[in-house]
Amino acid sequence: MPEAASVQAARATIGDSEFDRDTAVTPRGAGVYDVDLSAGWTIINAVNGGYLLAVLGRALADALPHSDPFTVSAHYLTASQPGPAVIRTDVVRTGRTLSTGQASLFQYDDEGREIERIRVLASYGDLDSLPADVRTTALPPAIPPMDQCFGPQDAPAPIPGSSAITDRLFLKLDPATLGWALGAPSGKGEMRSWFGLADGRDADPLSLLLAVDALPPTAFEIGLSGWVPTVELTVHVRARPAPGPLRVSITTRNLAGGFLEEDAEVWDSEDRMVAQSRQLARARLA
């Protein structure tokens, strides 16, 4: 594996980074939190779903007696907009090793009516207490060294609409999954990339909720274009990631009826699979 490249000379740290500030929630009392959704995590015309999941994940980490997400399932009900929002949490069950809670994020429409944007059900625990035994047939994704991969800065033309999120991410995509950027998609539903935060902050369990949904959609390499809105996203966090860059692999095997699935794996610098996810997304066929 290649030596990790330095993202920035002055590295941000966990707890003191743009990601931490932009996912911060302010307790209002009785399981209610205020948050200001940052426009810095938008792509095309939408707030990124992984960023939103991390925001709700942070609220649940505060509301529950355990701090690490183990499994998080979210249904995206309406499109979130940058700006103020409120999160309401509910503790469903607390146990010795796992606690379960639910959370919903709300915003107001132009007429002042409250609109639910996302609803989440999640179980939290302590990743550091898990046994070290691993038995797996999974293998890390085969991605070329970083200096042979390409990032958004190498694109021939900017993405139409907002691409603010790309300024906050360190992405180096596998050239084998970049045919869409050159007008020649491979037809395979695959996307692979080195991944990190642009300010050099190392990954933690909450940022893994972002990582599974931060690459370009696999639909691009299938030959589609435009926004691919998430309907449902489930993330399993398997281990606390080691410092260093992550590798993310996403595949789609079936596009039918205007919907596709994306299966993601996230691997850390020690060749451990630290997160998995599956999402159902709507494909714009027209």
Image (tube, rainbow, N blue to C red):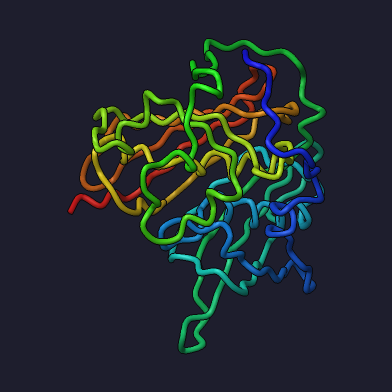
Quarter of the view holding residue 96: top right
User: Which residue sits at x=26%, y=35%?
Assistant: 222
Foreground residue, 110 or 45?
45
On the picture, is 60 further left or further right than 52? right
Which quadrant is home to the C terminus?
bottom left
On the picture, is 174 further left or further right than 83? left
Q: Residue furthest left?
A: 286
Measuring from the top left, give residue 73's x and y in whole percent.
54, 47
User: Which residue sits at x=48%, y=46%?
Assistant: 233
On the picture, is 128 further left or further right than 259? right
Measuring from the top left, give residue 9's x and y in whole percent.
76, 38
Foreground residue, 142 or 176?
176
Which quadrant is home to the N terminus?
top right
Measuring from the top left, give residue 81's x and y in whole percent.
51, 69
Please determine whether, in this image, residue 273 is positioned above or below residue 108: above
User: Which residue sits at x=47%, y=55%?
Assistant: 163
Quarter of the view holding residue 11: top right
The count of marks equals 0
On the picture, is 165 further left or further right than 91? left
Measuring from the top left, give residue 2's x and y in whole percent.
63, 15
Q: Residue furthest bottom?
A: 111
Please determine whether, in this image, residue 210 is positioned above or below residue 45: above
User: Which residue sits at x=50%, y=18%?
Assistant: 144
Foreground residue, 102 or 198?
198
